[in-house]
């Protein structure tokens, strides 16, 4: 599975709408970088955040997740409490080709501050805005900047198209916009 280069990502974005909106070159002056890089695409986080709270002493249950476990915040920055996490979504909408699997990695700028990003792989023919989990592993509050880079997506091209894609399975997170909480 080769990692696809910048010119392939650009072509897929421009001709097939793989990434919208698409930033053709990496922006980095005074911001956490975002846009097209040599072998990936650095996505931006939106201004919408769901910050984990345990005010009601809830139990986290992925089969019966309570939205009350979060407080909603909108704005240019998000402060994540110590040893907690927040959810946001990418500003970009992705449409993944049938023969491609996408892996997400956190930005080194945040990782060096103890801020970890987690996203599961984007499966072939999945589309939507990506929900991103941002963990603050430090004992201090952590600041996240909306509209700036939060993670990098790497596009791995399969030897051939898969037999059954995410779209074929009518996956439960297909076409999501905004932050999507766990679903069963």
Image: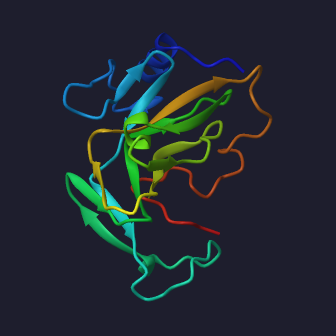
Residue 53: x, y in percent?
40, 76
> In which quadrant will I find the N terminus?
top right
The residue under the point 34% across, 30% down is 34
Q: Quadrant of residue 164?
A: top right
The residue under the point 56% across, 66% down is 182
Above-or-below relation of 174 to 140: above
In the image shown, does 125 or 33 lie closer to the viewer? 33
Q: Residue furthest right?
A: 163
Colour pattern = rainbow
Q: Residue furthest top?
A: 7
In the image shown, does 32 or 122 lie closer to the viewer? 32
Residue 31: x, y in percent?
23, 33
Residue 11: x, y in percent?
46, 15
> In which quadrant will I find the C terminus?
bottom right
Number of dots carrying numbers: 0
Residue 46: x, y in percent?
31, 49
The residue under the point 32% across, 30% down is 33
In the image shown, does 94 or 30 lie closer to the viewer? 30
Q: Quadrant of residue 98?
A: top right
Above-or-below relation of 25 to 33: above
Left or right: where 78 falls relative to 97: left
Q: Residue furthest bottom?
A: 56
């Amino acid at each position: 599975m080769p990692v696809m280069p910048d010119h392939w990502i650009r072509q897929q974005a421009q001709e097939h709408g793989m990434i919208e909106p698409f930033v053709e070159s990496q922006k980095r002056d005074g911001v956490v970088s975002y846009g097209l890089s040599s072998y990936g695409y650095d996505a931006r986080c939106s201004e919408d955040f769901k910050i984990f709270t345990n005010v009601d002493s809830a139990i986290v249950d992925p089969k019966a997740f309570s939205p009350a476990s979060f407080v909603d915040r909108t704005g240019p920055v998000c402060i994540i409490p110590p040893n907690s996490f927040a959810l946001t979504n990418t500003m970009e909408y992705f449409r993944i080709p049938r023969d491609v699997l996408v892996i997400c990695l956190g930005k080194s700028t945040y990782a060096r501050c103890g801020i970890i990003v987690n996203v599961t792989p984007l499966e072939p023919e999945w589309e939507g805005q990506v929900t991103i989990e941002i963990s603050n592993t430090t004992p201090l509050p952590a600041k996240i900047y909306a509209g700036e880079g939060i993670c990098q997506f790497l596009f791995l091209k399969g030897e051939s198209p898969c037999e059954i894609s995410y779209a074929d399975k009518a996956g439960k997170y297909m076409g999501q916009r905004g932050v999507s909480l766990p679903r069963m």
